[in-house]
Structures are given as structure tokens and as C-alpha cells.
Amino acid sequence: MAGADAYRFKFVESDSPDAEGGLLGAGFIVVTQDETEVQTIAHDFGMSISEIDPEQWLTVVDANGDGLPDFLVPNRRSDGDASVVGSLYQFDEAAGKFVLVETLSNIGLIDVINPGCLTITQEAADARLVRHEHCYSPQAGRWIRQLSLPGLMEEGERSALDWPEERQACAGPTPSLSECRRLRLTTDRTLHTALVEQKQAQRPALARERGRAYAQRYAVNLDASHRSWLQYRDNRCLAYVREQGFQAPLFQSANEACRFRLAQWQMQQYRVQ
């Protein structure tokens, strides 16, 4: 990192590196500041030297959004197409050291979306690549796995930095309860308006092609489908939040953020239809 008091990193092989199969093997990540060694981290590269870029073997990034340096470092190559399997070291300001985030490390390819959120891409048992999103909750003091929703991740909807200001109230896994709840209720009303507009747009054409009775049944079924979806969404979010094991003060805020996120996804579906 730039600056006089920057942290600098280098990899030093151990006295007896495991060079079997041409792999770099075990060693240490040495962290220095002002030419003073401040930390030595044991690390094992299951990769050959030729696979490691000497200029980019370690990536410094603010992963959890606290404004402090964290870093990503590769462990090994995966067997499939998911490429590098990496580890995340997060800076602990109280201890003044980098700490391995075990729940996110040595799983797959780590890609920081924006400060506070990242994705992990790994190969599933059926050789498919699966990607999971995790966001850091300062209130809970840990990383939270997010719901995987088709379309949202590809279009960057999960990136808080891409959201308009009025949507920031529900950014993150455990936002402010009252502000996020107001935004979620507003989004639900907008979602209902989109449903009404869809019915009004479809009914005349359906009445001409299939008859008025068919058009009326279509409208009734659409309303019932929306009510069922709302019930499904609320139940799914309750199950998701319970799985995370949040403390009571954070339970409702996480639930509102989940419901808002699913409402955004459903809005996309109505617009496509």
C-alpha cells in the first residue's frame, strides 16, 4: 500500500519447503511497516511458482467496508474451472493484526464486489460453477451469507454502491430497522401498483382473444398468485434469518432487508412479463 506507514508484504519459503510436484509449498507471509516486521503468517501455496504473479500474488482490498486494509491471497488451483481458491485476511484494529476469516477461506475464488460485500465462486459436485454472496454486518461483527437470487447478482443489484440514495436504507444484511421497514413497505406498494398495471394491460387483449370470463379469471388468479408469493417471501425470509442465528435486536432488521431484496427481485419479474 502507498504511504510512509503502509503495510508491505513478502512471501518467505520455510526451511523445508514442500516442492513435491513443482509446487511452491509452505512458507510465511511477512508483514512489515516502516521496515519493521509486525506479523508473520504461515501460508501454504499449493501452486507452482509459474502460476503466481510476483507483482500480484497478494491483493490488498477493503473487504468488510471498515476503511482498513484487508488482503486476499491464493491457496491453490481448483480442480475445475473456478480458478484460484483463496483466503481472506481481515485487519483487526484492536489487535493490530491481520486475521484469517475461516468461514470464507479455502472455499473458492473470492471476488470483492464493493467494500462490505464479496462473492465466492466454487465448483459444485456436478461440475457446475456456483457463486454465493456474503456481506459484512458491522452490527453482528461477522460475514452473512446472502440469498442467491437469479438476475440480481448478474445485474449488480446487490451492490450498495450502485443503489440510488433512496434505496440505501436497506443496504447491508442488518440495516436500520425503522428506515428499512419504511422502504420495504413503500416497495411493496410499488409492487402492488405494478401488478395492477399488468392486469390492466393484459385484460383487454385477453377479453378479445379468450372472452371476458377468461380475462376476469386471469385477474383473479394473478391476485391470488401475488398473495401466495407474499406469504412465500415472508416465510422464506424468516427461515433465512433464523438460519443466520442473529441476536434478537438484529433479527427484525435482517428480516426487513431480506423482504425488501425479494420485493426488488419480484419487481424485475413483473417488468419482464
Image (tube, rainbow, N blue to C red):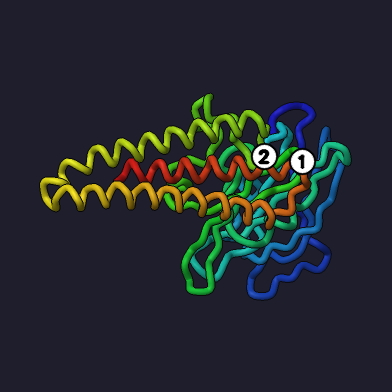
Could you tell me the amino acid type at mark 2? Ser
Could you tell me the amino acid type at mark 1? Pro
Tell which of 238 and 130 is nearer to you.
238
Q: Which residue does the image show at 53% across and 73% down from the upper left?
A: 125
Q: Is residue 217 left or right of residue 122?
A: left
Tell how many labels: 2
Callout 2 environment at 10 Å: few (<14), some (14 to 19), or many (20+)? many
Q: Is residue 244 left or right of residue 78?
A: right
Q: Are marks 2 and 1 in contact (CB under 8 Å)?
A: yes
Residue 60 visible at all: no
Vertical placement of 211 versus 81: above or below? above
Task: Determine the secondary structure under disc 1.
Answer: helix
**Image x and y of residue 240, in percent:** 62, 54
Q: Which residue does the image show at 52% across and 43% down from the upper left?
A: 261
Residue 46 visible at all: yes
Vertical placement of 88 versus 129: above or below? above
Tell which of 67 and 258 is nearer to you.
258
**Image x and y of residue 197, in percent:** 30, 36
Q: Quadrant of residue 22?
A: bottom right
Vertical placement of 42 versus 56: above or below? below
Residue placed furthest toward the top: 165
Vertical placement of 107 versus 201: above or below? below
Tell which of 33 and 202 is nearer to you.
202
Q: Which residue is mark 1?
A: 249
Residue placed furthest toward the front: 213
**Cα distance, mark 2 to mark 1?**
8 Å
Q: Which residue does the image show at 74% across and 47% down from the upper left?
A: 142
Tag of residue 113 = none
**Image x and y of residue 211, in percent:** 14, 50
Tag of residue 253 = 2
